[in-house]
Amino acid sequence: MLSPTTLARSSLEEMLESLRLRDNSDWPKDLPPALPSRPPSRARIRSGRWSAQPNFNTDSNSESGGEGQRKENELRVKRNPFWNKKRRKDVNVDSPYNVVAVEGIEGEERVEETGVLEGSDNIGYFIEKKLRVWCRQSNGVWVSGTIHSTSGEESFVSLANGNVVKVSTCHLFPANPEILDGVDDLMHLSYLNEPTVFHNLKYRYSRDMIYSKAGPILIAVNPFKDVQINGKDIVTAYKQKATDKPHVFAIAENAYNEMMNDGVNQSLMISGESGAGKTETAKFAVQYLAALGGGNVGIECQILQTSCLLEAFGNSKTSMNDNSSRFGKLIEIHFTAAGKICGSKIRTFLLEKSRVVQLANGERSYHIFYQLCAGAPQALRERLNLKMANEYNYLAQSDCLVINGVDDAQRFLKFMETLDIFQISKGEQDQAFAMLAAVLWLGNISFHAIDYENHVEASNDEALINAARLIGCEPHELKEALSARRIQTEEGNIVEKFTMQQAIDARDALAKFIYASLFDWLVEQINNLLEVGKQHTGWSISILDIYGFESIKKNSFEQFCINYANERLQQHFNRHIFKLEQEEYELDGIDGVKVDFADNQECLDLFEKKPIGLLSLLDEDLHSPDANDATLANKLKQNLNGMACFKGDKGRVFGVRHFAGEVLYDTNDFLKKNQDSLNPELIELLSSCNGQLPQLFAIKMLNQTLEPATSLDSPNQSVSAKFKGKLFKLMQRLEKTKPHFICCIKPNRKQLPGMYEEDLVSQQLRCSGVLEAVRMSRSGYPTRMTHQEFADRYGFLLLETNESQDPLSISVAVLKQFNMLPGMYQIGYTKLYLRIGLIGVLEDRRKQVLQTGKYTDEANKGSTLLTAIIGLQSVIRGCLVRKHFSNSHKLIPLRSKQKLVRENSEANDIPNEQSSAMAELQRRVVDAEASLGQKQQENATLQEQLQQYEAKMKKMDEQLQQSEAKMKKTEEQLQQSEAKMKKTEEMLRKQTAPLQASLAAAKKSEGSAMAEVGGRENGVSSLVKEFEQQKQSFEDGINKTTQPASNMNSYEELRKLKRRFRAWKKDYKVRLKETKAIVRKHRHQDSDKTQKKWWPNRGKVLQNCGKSPS
């Protein structure tokens, strides 16, 4: 049992004050200073001004109200209103995940970063006693030493190497005793300040102890090497509870236990900069959960292997990390009621598509391209006409093709094995590799000018031929789609040739679309195999592995979105670690610890505020025809210069002050990347390809066009709007779970083992809020339970019990019975708040009682079960006595003569009968106790099964409703398809009518020319006959596809008929043109007249033929 005095420690300032009082008083010198105990909370009436639980709104297009917004702004208070004891009336404290952002308050004072975590103004005591302290050298490195002397505001510190340095007294910090070096939990440090934290982490890092606790947070320092602390033996040790050292396994174990005990979904929030080791940490967490929930060997193996596929398609080498995740993912692992894994689902966010076509110097594209080029077997290379990576423009542009220590060929072999594990067929694998090779060949397609207006067309070279073959279309079709586009006008379609830049953009857009669609297809295949089974209970543990905060030499749209996401995640961390903690204290009448922290709400307002915010202004410029990257930068500076977190810079550059530091963004390509559009001609090309995957990608895109404009899947939505909507849905999902935080630290910028850069670590710890969280946890009450929960769990331990007592009285009585000091707990209106370690004492006593099967002497009298047993004994005794009395009464008339003797004899036998009755009674009482305990266990089991059945029935009802909704939607889509088919039939008939009339005119004019044409007299007749046949054929095909009894593939049949009509029309036009030339050659005097009668009609026909059926 931990000492109450140790647990009651409040802050460094109070400790130092007690030390000073000890020296100035008669306190015995050999005793430690007394630590102040926290008084119990005052009995205050609960405020009714607190608003209800916030509702989340994920509509990305919601608008802020006018008058209501103005009042809301007027009622806003300064940042961190939770630190004030009195809350202003009607303060808006809704969840931050409402779309409508609130304007910041002018004149707000920004929370400044400080290195002092606990009062440094008491350093005078250490100076007076010349104790060991920390001081910062001129190079920024912290060193420890002993105070040699002082002079005014300066002190002379003697370092370990014998040197004496002069340091300002205000820059000195107390040092911990050497016995505390390397403690595994920062809360155990006597003095908590920046240098002591950095020294402790560095001490452990140098000894390959990369995990440390910081209150509720696990700190994981990236070792940049294999430290052999995640093997099967380590997994077994944590499963068997043979060790309790800080580890990601311990966090996963805790989340699993809380899910099973409380029935609440859990989440592991892994944060950190790029290169801090988030992806590896997530894999270790999945590894341990798979070991805990093992039962289905196949599915747990598949969950572990998902990282191989996702890293190949979603990770790449950047300037900050050799295996950087360029997308975010949320891995949901679902469990049965017995705690076994029953399925999983992966959700992905914002794949960095621009990396496919554009790379910075020294970086690589996605790993799969290099693995395919290096490791593809010979047969596959021949089918794809595959070359080495340096021969593809998309890969060779960055002059970085390999990663030191990584064998891409070996990785590709493992990738192929993983595809087999996920039961992806050989045919599907070949199609996926064909799409990858097609993307590489698209990058090699070149363009050349065709006129003096800088119009271009694709060159008929090897790249064009290979790309078209791999996609499944003809080279000339791909060439036309990349060289021009059709524009709809009132007079018909106009073909517009591309300039060089437009053609390059169209080619790159097609490459990005194919790769992003292939990535989504792969994730869908994984989810289909890991689909949650029928044993799903709704219990899950989610692991969030999302891109870390980034600040590189040139930050573009991708870094803009990534850092915005990290701002939201930091807000989630602040809410759960600081804001919600402080709110709960104040709402429940607890005098909580006031901890200041750097709130990032202003930065979020800068991004999300409407109508003047970064995201709103960015989307607004998409609809402006004159907007470009330069005008966007100027617009941002004009509208946002007054906001505290915004900084205008020269040219196209603007700055944002993020929670992790200031980042400068270049607006170059911001608008193009935010729109990310694909020409309709390219979608139409993919839909007509022979390959299954291109058609699937095109159909998915076409289906999205049918979505409402406000839908996140609608192509009309910008990339930033889609990303914001998905981010809000992610935060909404995380808010429904209990979070466990893991903070990954990047120890050095060079990604080398054994190197520890204090300034880099210092910045990460400050920005992540770890240091403030430690102080709050150490000074606060991390364990809390409602009065009812506490009474139900520990009430039976009372020595004396009164059934009329309320849960609050029982809770207080339990704490007093175990002599808990007032500073170790506080009593709120609804909950009990306990210091660290106190709940362990109660759990040990409770466990001892339950395991022994009998109660200790202290608990026997207060047991509710004992009360029931005593009542049962009384009833049984009464029955036995009444039975005995009745038998005695019947014996009196039969032996009246010996009444006196009998009475004397019975009087003598009563003690013997009572003795035997008591033995029987005791036996029955023991049986009754056992039966009562068994019935209670059976009752608990039945209650649990009943709850599970109710949950399953509720889920079945929801699934039934969803199925009915899907059926209704399918019926509506079928009706829409039938309407489209009828419309297409009418359009086709209208288009063929002018052509038929033109042919009749041609036949009429044929008479005068046939005598001269001679053997060619059958030319026009054959064309007319062919036209009639094809017309009848197309009409029959249309009627067949529009029949009510046709199946769901009628739309696909109509599309094939459309392609066949186009091919015939093109060929027919050529032959008609040749016939026209022959007729004109033999007509001299009447040629002009014939041309006026016939060819104007022909122009209308060709114009109408250009309108293909929709």
Image (cartoon, helix red, strand yellow):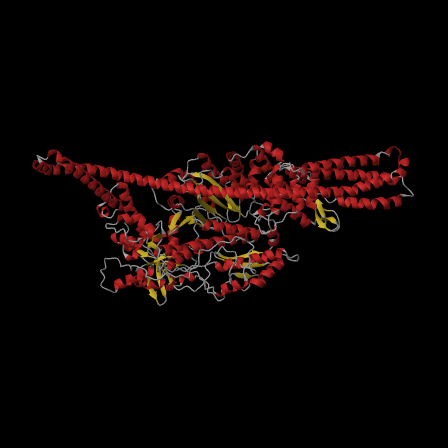
Extreme-right residue of the structure: 1085
The quadrant of the image that shows the C terminus is top right
Q: Left or right of 379: which side holds 896?
A: left
- Percent position (x, y) of residue 1060? 71, 37
Residue 1039 in view: yes
Q: Left or right of 652: which side holds 742?
A: left
Give above or below for 418 relative to 144: above
Extreme-bottom residue of the structure: 152
- Percent position (x, y) of residue 71? 50, 65
Give above or below for 1039 relative to 593: above
Give above or below for 124 relative to 674: below
Q: Left or right of 8: which side holds 1047?
A: right
Extreme-top residue of the structure: 379
The residue closer to the viewer here, 19 or 729, is 729
- The residue drawn where x is 75% and y is 39% is 1065
- The residue drawn where x is 37% and y is 42% is 943
Give above or below for 1092 relative to 884: below
The residue closer to the viewer here, 923 or 538, is 923
